[in-house]
Amino acid sequence: MSHLLENSVKFTIKNALKTILLFVSILLSSISFCQDSLSVLFIGNSYIFTNDLPTIFKNLTNSMGDIVTVDSKTNGGFTFQSHTNDPLTFQKIHNKPWDFVVLQGQSQEPSFPYSQVNTSTLPYAVQLADSVYENNACSQVHYFMTWGRQNGDPQWDSINTFNKMNSRLRDAYLRIADSSKASVSPSGPAWKYVIDNYPTINLFSSDGSHPSYAGSYLSACVFYSSIFEKSPVGATFIGSLDPNTALILQQAAALTVLDSISTWRLIHFDSLVQVDFTATELVPGNQIQFNSTASIYTDNLTWHFGDDTFSSDPNPIHEYTYNGSFVVSLIGTGVCGSDTAYQVINITSASLENQLKEAINCFVNNNGEIELIWKNNALDLSSVKLFSASGDLLPYQFEKRSQNHYILNTNAKGFLYLYTNDSISRNYFKLIKQ
């Protein structure tokens, strides 16, 4: 009997362990399944499909412990205008609510003369970006800031070297990003850093234009730093590169991107709604001019001035009526989230008139007495004076009832005005005594 019981207990424990292990397995699978994953669509041409840049970026990202899914729409030699004329490009854009859409023009077009870029490049780059935002208000557009050709473009003196062409591309892509409220992934500047400091690393293929594998790997590192705002240094995926070369390229991308996040207009995917503000003291010093800045994903702004007053004006002027330290907050909200910015404003020059408005709660009680509840201990009682409606200075006394609680004793009748001095206008504080 005991032998049967022992076997029964063993069987029960064994089944219980199986159940626990199965539960843990399901739980882990659920956690993995629910983990956030960023989606990135690449739209461009042969600079993207050479060496399969999207896949290099995906493998690099996964090796860093982050998750990304990628897709692409690339056609050899396509310009921004070419993509706007291709329904398949818009089909890709509207295929899903992408987290990021990378847009790349033909390798030369942004470096062409300013007027030509304005008519043949900029409008179509903006049109593609608008389509991305229309598909998903929380998508981010990243322009792929490509590199100058190895020997530049010989057709114009202004871009006939790598450095000249690279510089023109940099300026143009920043201008395009600014016009379409987008950001850039600065491959061109990262290429310049490597070429200047590690000339033995060949980033170009044999045509002096398209990337070698090292060039594509460097761009993938730049995309990783731009999208995740993290360093790719330490990525275990290095493709066909030797470890030392891969490390140099990882470091170059981190240095190029992370030291200049604001230059490249980058916004972290977890912080699409971003607000900030400046505060400028006006004359007199109790007036403050507030000016807000907000990301394109911010739809509404609300100010809390720290003195129980509010505003929805983007750039309000606020007057503080009493001295003190005030915690000012600006709250930005939108469909993609919210953000709050704070500053402490110190006011030391609010006028006695305004201080008096905030300092006194005044009323006539049931006994016909004028009661004053003093709310500001710092206000000097000796500065207060009583006037009639005709402007005559009247005698009075303060009778203290308790801490900050007074009775104003006066024989005057009718409308009485309380001032902090006899030069202040008479329309801000009125007492009635029957």
Image (cartoon, rainbow, N blue to C red):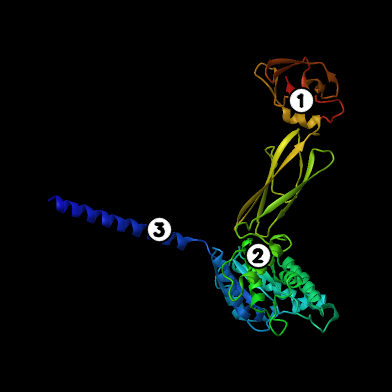
Placement of 277 over or under 39, stated as above or below = above
The label number, if any, that marks residue 27 in the structure image: 3
Residue shown at the point (75%, 80%) measured from the top left = 150
Q: CA distance from mark 2 to mark 3?
A: 33 Å
Which of the two labelled residues, at mark 2 and mark 3, occupies the earlier sequence position?
Answer: 3
Dot 2: within a 10 Å radius of its alpha carbon, few (fewer than 14), some, or many (20 or more) residues? many
Secondary element under disc 2, as helix, strand or loop, is helix
Residue 320 image offset from top left, x and y in percent: 76, 37
Residue 192 image offset from top left, x and y in percent: 75, 71
- Whether residue 400 sits left or right of residue 419 in the image: it is left
Tally the marks.
Answer: 3
Residue 346 image offset from top left, x and y in percent: 75, 37
Q: Quadrant of the C terminus?
A: top right
At label 1, which amino acid type do we have? Leu
Which-is-in-front pick, marks 2 and 1?
2
Instruction: Name the one closer to the observer, 306 or 41.
Output: 41
Label 2 belongs to which residue? 226
- Whether residue 21 sits left or right of residue 95 in the image: it is left
Which of the two labelled residues, at mark 3 and mark 1, occupies the earlier sequence position?
Answer: 3
Label 1 belongs to which residue? 379
Placement of 334 over or under 411, stated as above or below = below
Secondary element under disc 1, as helix, strand or loop, is loop
Which of the two labelled residues, at mark 2 and mark 1, occupies the earlier sequence position?
Answer: 2
At label 2, which amino acid type do we have? Ser
Q: CA distance from mark 3 to mark 1?
A: 64 Å
Which-is-in-front pick, marks 3 and 1?
3
Secondary element under disc 3, as helix, strand or loop, is helix
